[in-house]
Amino acid sequence: MLHHSPMDQKIQYLNQMIEIIDTKVTIFKKNKSRLPQAAYTAEKQVLTRTIEDTIKLAEEIKPAPFSLINDLKALIKQL
């Protein structure tokens, strides 16, 4: 049986989070002009929190993926 290190599990989880964020942000950007203000604000808050949590996870990985972290920070500003 293969045992994954906690770091491997974090990397795997990080990759899954990036996929989810990519999908959600693409949909959000496509639809944001049609969203009512309350829905836009709520969706933006959820995406921002998710991205911030993903940044925290990325910072726990050694060596830290700085370009990914910077991309995620830039993504928050683009929402």
Image: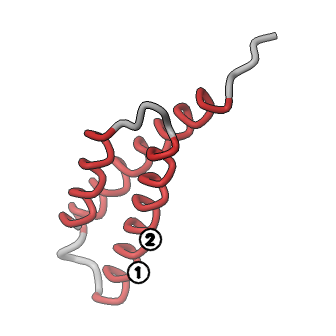
Q: Position of residue 21 (x, y in %)?
A: 39, 51
Horizontal arrangement in the rendering, residue 38 relative to residue 1 (left or right): left
Instruction: Determine the residue located farthest toward the right in the rendered image.
Output: 1
Task: State the separation of the CA atoms marked 1 and 2.
Answer: 6 Å
In depth, the one of 60 and 75 nearer the eye is: 60
Q: Is residue 55 above or below residue 66?
A: below
> Which residue is located at x 29 percent, y 86 percent?
36
In depth, the one of 10 and 64 nearer the eye is: 64
Color encoding of the figure:
secondary structure
Q: Amino acid at mark 1?
A: Ala
Q: Position of residue 14 (x, y in %)?
A: 49, 40
Label 2, residues with CA under 10 Å away: few <14, some 14-19, many ≥20: few
The image shows a total of numbered marks equal to: 2
In depth, the one of 71 and 25 nearer the eye is: 71
Q: Position of residue 17 (x, y in %)?
A: 48, 46
Q: Is residue 3 above or below residue 33?
A: above
> Which residue is located at x 28 percent, y 88 percent?
37
Q: Which residue is mark 1?
A: 42
Mark 1 in CB contact with mark 2 (< 8 angstroms): yes
Label 1, residues with CA under 10 Å away: few <14, some 14-19, many ≥20: few
Question: Quarter of the image holding residue 58?
Answer: top left
Instruction: Determine the residue located farthest toward the front in the rendered image.
Output: 63
Horizontal arrangement in the rendering, residue 64 relative to residue 6 (left or right): left
Q: Which residue is mark 2?
A: 46
Q: Amino acid at mark 2?
A: Val
Q: Is residue 62 above or below residue 45?
A: above
